[in-house]
Image (spheres, helix red, strand yellow):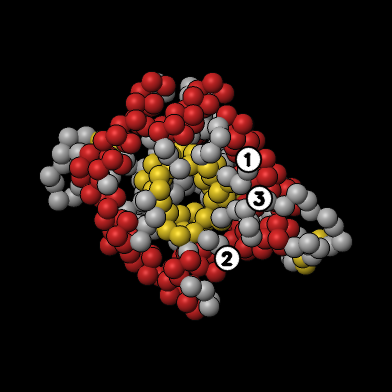
Amino acid sequence: MQYGFTLPGRGPLANPDNLATIAQRGEALGFDSISLGDHILVPHSISSEYPYTQTGEFPGSTTGQSMEQITALAFMAGCTEKIRLATSVLIVPHRNPIIAAKSLATLDYLSGGRLIIGVGVGWMREEFEAVGCEPFDERGAVTDEYIRAFKELWTSDNPTFEGKYVSFSDINFLPKPVQKPHPPLWVGGESRPAIRRAATLCDGWYPIGNNPSFPVGTPDALQQGMDRLRRTAERAGRNPEEIQIIYRSHDYRITGADTSSERTRFTGSSEQIAGDIRQYQDMGVSYLVLDIARLSGDGNLEETLGHLEDFTTQVAAKV
């Protein structure tokens, strides 16, 4: 099992010194990746429902703060040496695809091949309208086409593409990413279209366990999604074994032993959480991403660093 954790994208920890300190400590402790979310802006009024809370309220609406994701990860690349850098996730329709592909290729090139590209279609209609990108209701088709364009730009010596939303030809596109054929593409999302996108276009499926509309927060529910992924990949002529399963938990927390039959996975004693990891690993999950920074509600740096160390010494060491 490989382990990653999310960096704070807003609040008191989201400043250069704290972000560098958190990333460097995670690297020293042996974490495999750091990741950051993606919002170009936060509208004052949001009617769209956030998929990962029961109420549908977006946690970032109170601060209105958001760093540009690719720029922030480039900063993190300069603060670290070997830990991988993940977009978690890049809202693909928000950016011109040629510019996005260039930024991502440059980040992979300058970081020495450390980029992981989590991709998603987005959920906030108001943000789409404010950014002025392709229509919100076409975001799935836009995402599929942009991903295909990314691959052409990253892999072809003479990139050429003709689509509904993007076309290009007779261009150089250099430097290419260090990773071949390109940095891994992980599809965030739990819906059937997200599973289809992972199975047909990308290298990994990256669900979160907290989506009430498409629940995958239990082993049985996640297994159903994995079975659908396998069937869809086989129909598309792909080997399902080549598609990585990455699981992200909003719930992770070490507490006292929880003996209830309804215990949330990745909560409880360190032994119970280690047992959860072993179970998911046996199912075929090979990467676990934890929202560790959110455990410190008041943005306490030392507390956050302590949570990173507790995971490595009390949980990962027992897996």
Q: Amino acid at mark 2?
A: Leu
Indicate the position of residue 103 as horizontal and vertical percent values. 70, 44
Residue at position x 40%, y 33% from top? 29
- Which marked residue is nearer to the observer: mark 2 or mark 1? 1
| Contact (Cβ within 8 Å) of mark 1 with mark 3 | yes
The numbered disc on residue 20 is: none
**Of residues 287 and 187, the one drawn nearer to the viewer in this rendering:** 287
Q: Is residue 200 in view?
A: yes
Residue at position x 66%, y 50% from top? 178
Question: Which sits earlier in the primary sequence, circle 1 or circle 3?
Answer: 1
The residue pinned by badge 2 equals: 201
Horizontal side of residue 247 vs 177, given as left or right: left
Residue at position x 55%, y 42% from top? 85
Q: Residue furthest right?
A: 170
Indicate the position of residue 77 as horizontal and vertical percent values. 60, 35
Q: Amino acid at mark 3?
A: Val
Question: Which sits earlier in the primary sequence, circle 2 or circle 1?
Answer: 1
Quarter assignment of residue 162? bottom right
Question: Dot 3: within a 10 Å radius of its alpha carbon, few (fewer than 14), some, or many (20 or more) residues?
Answer: many
The residue pinned by badge 3 equals: 178
The numbered disc on residue 111 is: 1
**Distance of label 3 from label 2 (alpha carbons):** 20 Å
Question: Which sits earlier in the primary sequence, circle 3 or circle 2?
Answer: 3
